[in-house]
Image: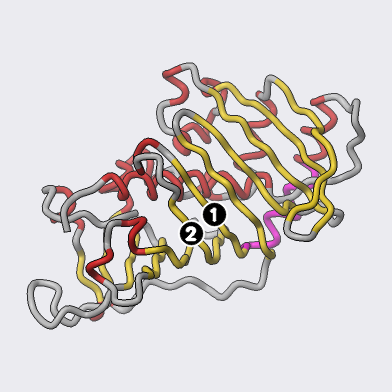
């Protein structure tokens, strides 16, 4: 493997996901004409229910300059609480890892501060017999970015907290999403007002950029879809269900090869 931009691009997607559940519960009681403050207050009250869900089954597509404008697809489970964790299935071509799997699909886990990639065991070489490759999150995102995947930024209310800085919050209309009737809301937050969540959005704070968030909320007060656009990155996230996910565990150490140092030296390309 050689180092590639897919690593940074998918890593950015996962950092975004840490904040995305911040909009994971809203109410549909807001009416057109309600003030932005009214909407923000309603979102804040509902955030406790989002925290209780603990996990969500998701389908996510991320496009950015880091992935040369090509969509990166992820489908699986995202969980929060004691740190952020995720298990997804991804097309190997999106990670430029086609040579590592026969079926064209990579299973990726993000747990306990590391990315893990399920691969076909190699018959020889340094990764002989290993079915997982491990890459520390800090090697891809840096210490600050890795910290953004823990603590307060892993809480489902993290994204909600940024909405108090929104320049505008509006009710767009009623739309069908995945067979559900939803209410569509939009909010725009200046990059320099993201507060503790800034690490999730890269350099926006220093470039004068902004985060535009669209949320489609179903009749149960839970999101069916969320889109975020900032800088050169666009993230489209469908919430298929909430709660009930099994725990996401790191693969057995004996089945894992750590490629972190190879990645740092530019000799390996992982993915994240």
Query: In terms of secondary structure, where does tag 2 sit?
Result: strand
Place of residue 226 in the rendered image (x, y in percent of width and height, measured from the top left): 65, 46
| x 53%, y 50%: residue | 154
- Rendered image: mark on residue 1: none
Q: Is residue 43 above or below residue 169?
A: below
Q: Which residue is mark 1?
A: 60
Query: Majority secondary structure of the magenta segment?
Result: helix
Image quadrant for the N terminus? bottom left
Image quadrant for the C terminus? bottom left
Side of 240 relative to 29 (left or right)? left
Instruction: Write down the region rendered in magenta.
Output: 44-56
| x 56%, y 61%: residue | 79
For residue 271: magenta? no
Q: Alpha carbon of mark 2 to alpha carbon of mark 1: how far? A: 5 Å
Place of residue 119 in the rendered image (x, y in percent of width and height, measured from the top left): 28, 73
Query: In terms of secondary structure, where does tag 1 sit?
Result: strand
Place of residue 171 in the rendered image (x, y in percent of width and height, measured from the top left): 82, 33
**Comes first in the chain, label 2 or label 1:** 1
Q: In front here: 46 or 127?
A: 127
| x 80%, y 33%: residue | 172
Which quarter of the picture shows residue 89? bottom left
Give the residue at the far top of this rendering. Answer: 208
Marks 1 and 2: in contact by CB < 8 Å? yes
Q: Residues within 10 Å of mark 1 (few under 14, many from 20)?
A: many
Side of 75 relative to 215 (left or right)? left
Q: Is residue 144 above or below residue 59?
A: above
Q: How is the image coloured?
A: secondary structure
Q: Which residue is mark 2?
A: 74
Q: Is residue 39 above or below residue 179?
A: above
């Amino acid at each position: 493997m050689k180092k590639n931009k897919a690593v940074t691009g998918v890593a950015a997607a996962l950092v975004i996901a840490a904040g995305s559940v911040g909009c994971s519960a809203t109410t549909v009681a807001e009416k057109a004409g309600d003030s932005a403050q009214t909407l923000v207050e309603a979102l804040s009250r509902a955030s406790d229910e989002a925290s209780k869900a603990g996990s969500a089954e998701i389908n996510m597509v991320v496009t950015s300059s880091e992935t040369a404008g090509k969509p990166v697809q992820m489908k699986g489970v995202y969980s929060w609480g004691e740190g952020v964790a995720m298990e997804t299935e991804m097309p190997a071509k999106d990670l430029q890892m086609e040579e590592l799997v026969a079926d064209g699909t990579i299973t990726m886990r993000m747990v306990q501060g590391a990315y893990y990639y399920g691969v076909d065991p190699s018959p020889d070489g340094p990764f002989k017999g290993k079915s997982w490759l491990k890459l520390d999150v800090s090697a891809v995102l840096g210490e600050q970015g890795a910290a953004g995947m823990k603590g307060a930024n892993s809480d489902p209310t993290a994204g909600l907290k940024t909405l108090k800085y929104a320049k505008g919050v509006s009710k767009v209309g009623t739309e069908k999403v995945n067979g559900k009737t939803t209410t569509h809301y939009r909010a725009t937050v200046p990059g320099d007002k993201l507060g503790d969540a800034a690490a999730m959005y890269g350099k926006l704070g220093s470039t004068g950029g902004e985060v535009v968030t669209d949320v489609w909320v179903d009749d149960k007060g839970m999101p069916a879809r969320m889109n975020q656009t900032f800088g050169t990155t666009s993230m489209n996230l469908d919430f298929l269900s909430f709660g009930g996910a099994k725990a996401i565990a790191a693969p057995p150490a004996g089945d894992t090869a750590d490629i972190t140092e190879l990645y740092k030296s530019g000799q390996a390309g992982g993915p994240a």
